[in-house]
Image (tube, helix red, strand yellow):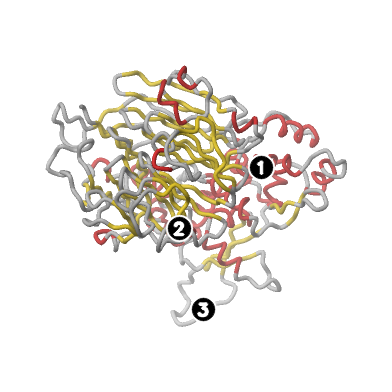
Amino acid sequence: METSVYLIPTEDFSFIVKNNNKKLSIWSETKIKKTQTIKKIVCGVDSHFLVWKKPNKLEFYETGNEKRKYQLPKNETIKDIFSSCQTYQILTESGKVWSLADGNHYKEVPLLDADQSTFEEIRPVTFFEELKLSVDSLAMCAYSVYYLCNGDQLYASGSNSNGRLGNGKIGGSEPMPVYVQDKVTKIFAGNSALNFFFTRSNPDLLYACGNNSYGELGVGSTGTSSSPTVVKNVKGSEILTLKSGDYHAILINKKGQTLSCGNPETNGLGSQKTTFTVIPQLKDKKAVQLEIAISRNLILTDQNELYTWGSSDFFYSTNEFNNESFPKKLSLPSFFTNYLDSKDMIRIASGAYVTFLYLDFNNTLSRDLRMLFESKKFCDCEIGSLGNKIPVHKGLVEFRTKLTIEQIQKKLFEQKSINKKQTLSFLKWIYYDTISNLEKLEQTFNSLQLTFPPSVENTLEKDMAKLYKDDDSKDFKILVKIDDDDENENESKEGNYEEIPVHKFILLARSGLFREMFDNVNEKDNTNKVQDYSHKTIESLEILIKYFYTDSIELTGDEDPELIVDELSDAVEYYQLNDQCNLMSELLKIKKQFDLN
């Protein structure tokens, strides 16, 4: 069977294709029509995959067939996409689930007429709506799906082979989701494994159930477990990601360590382990991404190094990769590595017959503002009715609505025309452009006498670009030390600074360094200024601050491009920016534009 490896190294959706039948070199390049920015790719067990386009667009590709395009209703915004075998599931911000699959492969999806389904259409899963359940997240393994609903309630559907549904039974299937337990905070599963993992309200406990032939559950023994069993030597709160294959499991913790257990041929340890153990070849590497496709593993480090091991049946048939039982570094083509100037720019996705590596040029502004909203930290005011107050950041709310907090409070809450759920829906749009309930949002807009509907896409980015130019509303200043050529090296002058005006919430959303600074500020101190200790020029810092608002770098012609690139090359690490940000790709564009080495 033909094996293909696709790589997307640029924004114009260039593919790198490996085709064993034609005996091409490991990587060779093929381009297809330019498309929109890609948010995520997931792969099925066969030669097909699903590409997520923002905000609610999807494309399905299958070997030998033209791509199919899908678009969810305009009032639905995609939160995440998932895959297993020949089934895909789409979770939207409204808590609804949609499915895409082919015929009898729908057996794990809770649809009454699942056997009539095809890849031609996306089908809504109405089960949860009927029970008034909102799905927060889900995880998939072979022919089974796990749903985390209403904050902490775990449901499962599909095959119960080896007791993987966790309901105490072995065998059979559950076509409609069954309740498993509550107080669950996070769930994990593998592409084709017979087990799942989840953490409960006690973050130090990690549970697992299902097939355990080789000890792949990490519970310290072998043998099927049909009820959740505590995993040994692992704290759930410390897990970054966890996935499982046929007979092994791998996790990456928040320190970047890679641990595995199970089958010695695919766990990377070379010996059977029934508890999670650090993989020796990766002990000095900081892993950031993990993919498992049946019996093949891919690990990406923070240095953009790709390691792989396991069965080569569905991978390379060259000397570079041949049924390796231990992690082996996989070389990437020079035309791809030329793009790599920062950590964690690569994204990986893998299925049985197809593997992707692609660069993430996505805008991270909305993600950063979303984290700021969800953290509820550094808020400077509240909105809401008595007993249901919600902390917010005044500058952002007032700019996006063009109303004062007092006006919003009076129009919405003094008349008791809006409840807490509607308020949260409204604030999701304010912070990160998400429309979770179009009808409720329209009611809120009408109460505030705002124009409706707002644009679903790019409203936030346009508003932030306008906010950058709005000097009158800036409430904070960054002090930049100015060098004085006449100053003695051992002496300093007080007050020799220039100021960069900025909105405080922008610094809080975008930079971990500034968040730490604000954490350490004494309440009695003057908190409307902070000094930058990076020793960068004010020219570079002004460019960086503009990037905080716009997620892009555009030079006007007055700047020194070589200085900008040189001084901001360490900004991701120094200012503790989101590790998915595109700052380094923006600097790379400047280097190419001005032909800098």
Residue 325: % across, % down: 20, 50
- Look at 50% across and 45% down and name the residue there: 364
Assess whether mark 1 and mark 3 are in contact (beta carbons under 8 angstroms).
no
Residue 477, quarter of picture: bottom right
First in residue order: circle 2 vs circle 1: 2
- Looking at the rendering, in which quadrant would you find the N terminus? top left
Closest to the observer: 366 or 265?
265
Q: How many discs appear?
A: 3
Location of residue 78 with respect to 592 vertically, above or below = above
Q: Residue furthest right?
A: 415
Residue 395: % across, % down: 69, 51
Q: Amino acid at mark 1?
A: Ile
Residue 550: % across, % down: 53, 44
- Look at 46% across and 60% down and name the residue there: 238
In this image, 174 relative to 277: left or right?
A: right
Location of residue 361 with respect to 566 vertically, above or below = above
Q: CA distance from mark 3 to mark 2?
A: 59 Å
Q: Amino acid at mark 2?
A: Val
Q: Element type at marker 2?
A: strand
Q: Which residue is mark 1?
A: 430
Q: Which residue is mark 3?
A: 492
First in residue order: circle 3 vs circle 1: 1
For disc 1, the neighbor class at 10 Å (few under 14, some 14 to 19, many from 20) is: many
Q: Find residue 230 and name its label.
A: 2
- Look at 48% across and 77% down and name the residue there: 487
Q: Element type at marker 1?
A: helix
Which mark is in front, 3 or 1?
A: 1
